[in-house]
């Protein structure tokens, strides 16, 4: 099983030996009968420690990211919290991107900050700035997100992994926007991959989840212990839905990328659009790196509008097919206004998103319908 598309369908998905059911069942149970005290069947004891449906998802995720260990969680932020608690102690310092996902910043700044963790947000595309932000002895983690949210900045994972390892840091990549179908950070030298599986991996806007994938056995043991000891695990039904979504991940990502590319090319030069942020455009400053480290440019893009904040708000409220909502990565197209939605928690800080920006999650509808929807809404501004 070497091909990515084959693994997306089969890794960890053996048919049910009792009935022959092609699809492994949802083990909707909180506990497992023991054959005498400590006589566990397949190692299963209690749902917080392990459940076969979660195991099947974790095996699948490890296979897709090319890592030895995967853990799935109730949300992306639960996964991040578990990882950061495994890696950090009071007084430790984290270097992260200056347009990191708002929730990641909030978790580090407002939750872990109270436990003595410090952060510095830098421009990750500037390797000198990253190097300068590292505090020898106390910096433990370099947190990378590429493409970033919402300005679609691209950072060179291999270069940052090398820089981070030279400084003795654990290099974490939030791979939510690309998914393993388009980008595999562990192959590029990263230590840990983080996902909000709520987004492209689940892919159908019907389940919340998160995941961590890593090679390092010692770190995996710490993460596994915390997952069990804290308990933010994926529920069986959620794990099953996520597996169901993953089977079509490669085909979905190819079509998300094709639709987004067509929309980006259509909107470049539109009089109402000041700038299109999409790494598939040759003029995007990260295009060459993206072309090297990704196998497609994905379905996310942002638009800066010439009409300023008011035009951005009106566009976000003015489309029909692109529905106004938080989140991304589903089969249906969504539009958001980061300043007041996904990035409201960083408003007024150095991490704030320009107020004339809207973010698009380009879905799998007919691209002609999506273009028409945007054109009509832009004409009404
Ligand atoms: C949504 C998101 C998260 C957080 O995941 P949840 O599943 O919402 O907890 C983290 N990183 C990125 C890039 C995201 O888009």
Image (cartoon, rainbow, N blue to C red):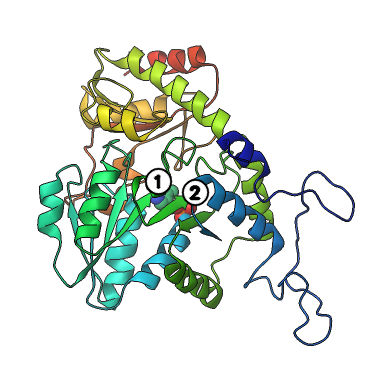
Q: Residue furthest bottom?
A: 37
Q: Is residue 2 above or below residue 33?
A: above
Q: Residues within 10 Å of mark 2 (few under 14, many from 20)?
A: some
Q: Which secondary structure, mark 1?
A: helix
Give the residue at x 15% y 61%: 134
**Coordinates of residue 330 in the picture (x, y in percent):** 53, 36
The percent coordinates of residue 184 (x first, y second) are 42, 43
Please tell me which residue lies in front, 247 or 202.
Answer: 247
Locate residue 126 relative to residue 13 in the image: left or right: left
Residue at the spot 40% in from the left edge and 46% down from the top edge: 187
Residue picked out by circle 2:
66
Q: Is residue 73 above or below residue 324?
A: below
State the residue at coordinates (27%, 64%). 109
Left or right: 97, with 280 as reference point: left
Q: Quadrant of residue 154?
A: top left
Give percent across and percent down for residue 118.
Answer: 21, 69
Mark 1 lies on residue = 187
């Amino acid at each position: 099983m070497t091909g990515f598309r084959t693994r997306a369908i089969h890794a960890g998905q053996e048919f049910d030996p009792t009935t022959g059911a092609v699809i492994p069942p949802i083990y909707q149970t909180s506990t497992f009968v023991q054959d005498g005290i400590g006589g566990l069947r397949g190692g299963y004891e209690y749902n917080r420690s392990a459940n076969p449906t979660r195991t099947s998802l974790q095996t699948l995720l490890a296979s897709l990211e090319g890592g030895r260990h995967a853990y799935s969680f109730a949300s992306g932020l639960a996964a991040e919290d578990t990882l950061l608690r495994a890696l950090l102690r009071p007084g430790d310092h984290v270097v992260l991107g200056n347009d990191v996902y708002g929730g990641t910043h909030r978790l580090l700044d407002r939750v872990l900050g109270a436990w003595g963790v410090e952060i510095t947000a830098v421009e990750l595309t500037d390797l000198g700035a990253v190097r300068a932000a590292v505090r020898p002895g106390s910096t433990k983690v370099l947190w990378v997100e590429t493409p970033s949210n919402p300005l679609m900045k691209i950072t060179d994972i291999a270069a940052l992994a090398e820089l981070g390892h030279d400084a003795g840091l654990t290099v974490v990549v939030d791979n939510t926007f690309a998914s393993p179908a388009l980008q595999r950070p562990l192959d590029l030298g990263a230590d840990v991959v983080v996902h909000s599986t709520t987004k492209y991996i689940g892919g159908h806007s019907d389940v919340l989840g998160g995941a961590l994938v890593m090679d390092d056995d010692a770190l995996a043991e710490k993460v596994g212990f915390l997952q069990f000891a804290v308990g933010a695990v994926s529920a069986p039904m959620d794990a099953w839905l996520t597996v169901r979504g993953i089977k079509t991940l490669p085909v979905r990502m190819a079509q998300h990328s094709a639709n987004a590319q067509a929309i980006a090319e259509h909107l470049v030069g539109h009089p109402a659009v000041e700038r299109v942020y999409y790494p598939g455009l040759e003029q995007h400053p990260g295009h060459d790196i993206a072309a090297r480290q990704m196998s497609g440019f994905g379905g996310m893009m942002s638009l800066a509008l010439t009409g300023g904040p008011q035009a951005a708000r009106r566009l976000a409220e003015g489309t029909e097919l692109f529905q106004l909502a938080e989140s991304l990565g589903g089969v249906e197209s969504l539009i958001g206004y980061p300043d007041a939605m996904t990035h409201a928690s960083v408003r007024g800080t150095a991490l704030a998103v320009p107020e004339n920006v809207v973010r698009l999650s380009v879905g799998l509808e007919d691209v002609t319908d999506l273009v028409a929807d945007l054109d009509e809404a832009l004409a009404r501004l």
